[in-house]
């Protein structure tokens, strides 16, 4: 199940079939570079999941629902629950797998509700989700009518979580490849006439040292007139600080490279070949949206904020505010 050949084999008879050989070579290299000590354990867990395929799937509800609780005995449900819990931590969700509620750290349905109905409808569109996490937004895109969704993310844990869900609905037109955006073969794709209609980048930009390079990667994957849906951290009402470069952790996160103002972000988008930039939403992240649960027992947002001033991080920076924008490739 979790092998480069099996992952790429899922692309057969998909819109990306013409570049399967290119992707196989790239995924095999990335697989070797990204070895993880728990990978064999995750593989064994996936193979130990009780066998059944279900046609019951609700990809439009807040919790991505697969199967019904009556399809398994309580004993089997407990087996599935224990296996799913072994893929801790679950960052994105929620999911409902045969009545087992996976209450992930992020209530990602809230973010989806902010953009749903405000982006170009996904019906029959070819969709790419860059930095897809465990695939929550990929399943929701299918629920909104996408004809095929490809997700890329270098995390093998997220890949295992995705397949724990997909295991019971393997026929869905969705594929996850463990790649970064700079590894994706855009040149070969375009040579074969493959272009995406919609590209999502949700929570990736602020991890990149060269944000314009990331936006250029997204633009190259889109067809002309295609839509980018971008979510990122942003600075608000701070004219003296157009870009925040944290020296050290930001909200206890060591991998935040920069946080731009809205004006700077718009400039980067225009520089990368995008126009018709529309702000969908600007929201302060709250502990109701990001928090510790039994499915993610590590520290979360409440531990990242100043206990005396929730508008500041524990380091004294402005607390997380996120923006969602859409932009069209010119």
Image (cartoon, rainbow, N blue to C red):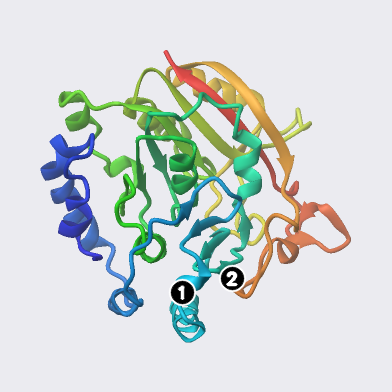
Instruction: Give the secondary structure at mark 1.
Output: helix
Q: Position of residue 171 (x, y in %)?
A: 29, 52
Q: Among all residues in the image, which is located at the extreme bottom?
A: 75
The answer to whether 8 appears left or right of 41 in the picture is: left
Q: Among all residues in the image, which is located at the extreme right?
A: 308
Residue under label 2, please give it. 296
Residue sitting at x 28%, y 63%: 34
Residue sitting at x 35%, y 77%: 50
Q: Position of residue 150 (x, y in %)?
A: 34, 43
Q: Is residue 25 visible?
A: yes
The answer to whether 57 appears left or right of 235 in the picture is: left
Q: Quadrant of the N terminus?
A: bottom left
Instruction: Give the secondary structure at mark 2.
Output: loop
For residue 106, which quarter of the picture?
bottom right
Between discs 1 and 2, the one toward the N terminus? 1
Characterize the local packing of mark 2: few (<14), some (14-19) or many (20 or more) Cα atoms within 10 angstroms: many
The answer to whether 185 appears left or right of 227 in the picture is: left
Q: Position of residue 266 (x, y in %)?
A: 58, 22
Q: Is residue 209 visible?
A: no
For residue 217, which quarter of the picture?
top left
Q: Position of residue 182 (x, y in %)?
A: 31, 41
Residue sitting at x 38%, y 61%: 54
Of badges 1 and 2, the one in the foreground is 1
Q: Are marks 1 and 2 in contact (CB under 8 Å)?
A: no
The answer to whether 129 appears left or right of 244 in the picture is: left
Residue under label 1, please give it. 84
């Amino acid at each position: 199940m979790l092998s480069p050949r099996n992952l790429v084999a899922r692309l057969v008879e998909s819109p990306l079939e013409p570049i399967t050989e290119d992707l196989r070579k790239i995924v095999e290299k990335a697989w070797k570079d990204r070895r993880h000590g728990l990978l064999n354990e995750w593989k064994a867990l996936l193979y130990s999941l009780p066998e059944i395929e279900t046609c019951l799937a609700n990809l439009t509800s807040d919790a991505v629902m697969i199967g019904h609780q009556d399809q398994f005995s309580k004993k089997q449900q407990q087996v599935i629950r224990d296996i799913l819990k072994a893929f801790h931590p679950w960052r994105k969700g929620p999911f409902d797998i045969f009545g087992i509620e996976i209450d992930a750290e992020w209530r990602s349905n809230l973010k989806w509700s902010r953009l749903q109905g405000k982006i170009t409808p996904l019906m029959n569109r070819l969709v790419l989700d860059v930095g897809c996490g465990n695939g929550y937004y990929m399943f929701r895109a299918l629920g909104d009518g996408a004809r095929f969704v490809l997700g890329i993310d270098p995390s093998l844990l997220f890949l295992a979580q995705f397949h724990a869900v997909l295991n019971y609905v393997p026929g869905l037109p969705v594929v996850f490849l463990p790649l970064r955006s700079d590894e994706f073969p855009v040149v070969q794709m375009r040579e074969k006439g493959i272009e995406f209609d919609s590209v999502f980048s949700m929570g990736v930009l602020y991890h990149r040292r060269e944000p314009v390079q990331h936006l250029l990667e997204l633009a190259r994957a889109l067809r002309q007139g295609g839509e980018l849906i971008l979510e990122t951290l942003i600075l608000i009402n701070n004219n003296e600080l157009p870009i925040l470069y944290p020296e050290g952790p930001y909200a206890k996160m060591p991998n935040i490279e920069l946080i731009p103002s809205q004006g700077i972000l718009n400039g980067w988008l225009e520089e990368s070949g995008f126009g018709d930039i529309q702000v969908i939403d600007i929201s302060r992240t709250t502990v109701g949206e990001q928090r510790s649960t039994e499915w993610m027992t590590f520290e979360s947002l409440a531990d990242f904020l100043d206990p005396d001033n929730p508008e500041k991080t524990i380091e004294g920076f402005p607390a997380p505010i996120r923006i969602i924008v859409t932009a069209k490739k010119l």
